[in-house]
Image: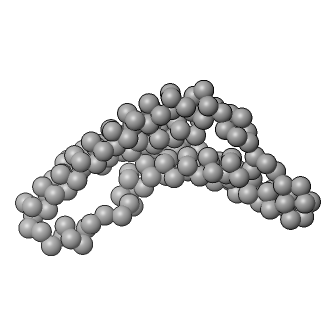
Amino acid sequence: MESVNLVVTWLLAIILGTMSLVVFSQVIYRYVLEAPLPWSEELARYLMVWLVLLGASLGLRSKALIGMEALVNVFPPRLKRFSIEAVLVFSLLFLTVVMIYGIKLTIMNHSQVSPAMAIPMSWPYAAIPVGALLMITNALVVAIERWKNN
């Protein structure tokens, strides 16, 4: 899984660089050349969606997402462990539902095209199931590591 996360990290760097370049170009074209690019805002938005969903999977893996640790840390050890495992189970169930419906949305919107770039809308929507699958996988890796350490 670490090799997949490395690829995701590089993809995030490329996406962020591309998004920055597109937004900077739009500013130059709009305010300096007075000829705005009609597709730049749309591309930046779709790249941001991919950036957030892929980045969330890496945040989950590195345990950098917001949690309720202050509340959980006051629990007795047995209740603390149960609450952490319950959150994991509910998170996995939620992410599974997100992935299933994300796949349905991606398929359903394949024939629709985006207004400015005229690409299939399945491309931006595909970020949902891909991100959810990566989050599920990373959550399972974190859980396995936690169980091995206890």
The reply to whether residue 136 is in sight is: no
Q: Whole-percent x and y of residue 18?
A: 70, 50
**For residue 27, above or below residue 37:** below
Tell me the quarter of the picture where residue 129 sits. Answer: top left
How many marks are shown on the rendered structure?
0
The one of 28 and 111 positioned closer to us in this rendering: 111
Q: Whole-percent x and y of residue 78?
A: 7, 60
Q: Residue at x 52, y 44 (%)?
A: 8
Q: Whole-percent x and y of residue 15?
A: 63, 48
Q: Residue at x 90, y 60 (%)?
A: 34
**For residue 137, above or below residue 85:** above
The one of 103 and 64 positioned closer to us in this rendering: 103
Q: Is residue 70 left or right of residue 42?
A: left
Q: Is residue 121 left or right of residue 66?
A: right
Q: Is residue 30 left or right of residue 15?
A: right
Q: Quadrant of the N terminus?
A: top left
